[in-house]
Image (cartoon, helix red, strand yellow):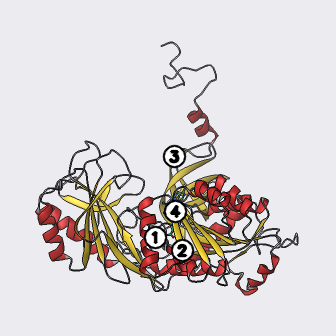
Amino acid sequence: MRKGTNKGGSNGRPNRGRSTAAEKERADAPFQKNEEVTVEIIGLTHDGEGVGRANGFTLFIQGALPGERVRAKVMKVKKQYGYARLVELLEKSADRQEAPCDIFKECGGCQLQHLDYAAQLAWKRQHVVDNLVRIGKLNVAGEGDADALGAEGIVVHPTVGMDKPWRYRNKASVPIGTHNASGELIAGFYARGSHRIIDMDDCLIEHEHNDEVVRVVKRIGRELGVTPYDEETGRGVLRHVMARTGVVTGEIMVVLITNVKKLPSADRWIERIREELPGVKSIVQNVNSRETNVIFGDETRTLWGSDVIYDELDGIRFAISARSFYQVNPVQTVELYRRAVEYAGLTGNEDVIDAYCGIGTISLFLARKAGRVYGVEIVPEAIEDAARNAELNGIENASFEAGPAEVVIPRWREEGITADVIVVDPPRKGCDPALLDTILKMQPKRVVYVSCNPSTLARDLRVLEDGGYKTVEVTPVDMFPHTTHVESVALLVRRDNVSVDLIIDPQVITT
Ligand code: SAH
């Protein structure tokens, strides 16, 4: 026996009572790999997997829904939990529906198409509530002991849904690859949990224009014999196609993300795209030759047409450049921003700070009702767009600065800028602690928190609550139907500014 290297009993000999962690986990679990079991499903994870319980053990099962009883084959066993594959539905949930998309099971883009839309909305609200309670340790009206304790809970409204929750996305970023068998250029989505590309011509959550752009780029790529980028070798020309449509204006931008600086046959590309897509206003190339999952590289140039396309939200016009963040669901964006403005409680005189402002979208909605708006954002191109957008709409009471919110806003404070309202709309990781600290020092009457991640929302609300604010109400808005993403907007008030509580409508505490 080799000395010191034998970690377990794999050679059949005893190993003086020691076993590997993995072996111990398997021994403790009530199931073995490949065993078929009957499981009751009691919940959904934030990734949309069914959470099952069998013999007191937790099994995660893709495709199973709460309330169902299923047969499943155990695939992986850990100490506390395992993963199993759905084999048969023994009892179906009344909320189950046939997923309308043919590639739903393979594609990683949507997670909830098998769940009725009303049930998706209810799940999203409950997901927000659960995060507020578990992570934020907050009292939510109608939940747990909040009412029994006489504590005034946060009102979490029903999720604002869409009348037609399909074809809502204004932007598609689609990887280009090679079909394994035919060697043909394909474009589609990564299969769930992998980087295998599934060819796709039609995506039911995409605007039709964007699907058309992807089909056209695929066709031209094949005609011109373009080589798709290969992640393994780092070779090939075309990596991604990004399509963006101004849903109100109908303007289309096509971005070809290439692995090489010079796009071969660039003139033919331009000619053919213009022939096939009469609505195109902008054709852009972005160069990304790095080995990375990040889609965009640093170099962007316009091959033809304008550097930007325009879109409109609630009568405000926005110029959007290839690299700027712009919300993907314009119908629901208007719903979200209207609530953010309502929560800001503006009368026309207030000084408002919009942190993480992107191209100034929320800032300009606020500026129509405020005295003065200060926007801050880390991407310089987005700040250029924001300033241009204010001018485009004749809005003179908004100004913008590029930089990290957690650095710029403390400096504004030192320079004597005050805020009646601070709006934040951070990325998934939530607000920087230095920003939360500055908010507590600036003492605005209200804080409006727009969030795309309920767990960091809950964490940050706890900090603000501990610093003297009270969370009054939260509205989830369904920006991403059929996916597990949950957007919400929260209103906080300074505890010594209580009259604001009166704006709650007690009718709305339903699921
Ligand atoms: N409010 C905008 C953008 C929200 S997305 C809208 O609704 O369109 C979040 C934005 O935060 C992105 O534009 C991102 O570039 C920006 N961002 C990320 N980290 C930042 C930081 N530390 N300081 C300021 N902005 C930041």
Q: CA distance from mark 3 to mark 1?
A: 49 Å
- Which element carries disc 3, helix, strand or loop? strand
**Which residue is the site of mark 4?**
401
> Height in image: 28 above or below 164?
above
At which x and y percent is residue 19?
59, 27
Q: Is residue 369 left or right of residue 101?
A: right
Residue shown at the point (62%, 60%) measured from the top left? 412
- Which element carries disc 1, helix, strand or loop? helix
Q: Which of the pair 86/454 is nearer the observer? A: 454
Which label sits on residue 398? 2
Marks 3 & 1, CB-CB < 8 Å contact: no
- Which element carries disc 4, helix, strand or loop? strand
Badge 2 crowding class, 10 Å Cα cut-off, few under 14, some 14 to 19, many 20 or more, is many
Marks 2 & 1, CB-CB < 8 Å contact: yes
Q: Quadrant of residue 153?
A: bottom right
Amino acid bearing label 4: Glu
Amino acid bearing label 3: Lys
Q: CA distance from mark 2 to mark 3?
A: 55 Å
Residue shown at the point (41%, 79%) measured from the top left? 392
Which label sits on residue 76? 3
Circle 3 or circle 1, nearest the eye: 1
Q: Is residue 288 left or right of residue 83?
A: left
Badge 1 crowding class, 10 Å Cα cut-off, few under 14, some 14 to 19, many 20 or more, is many
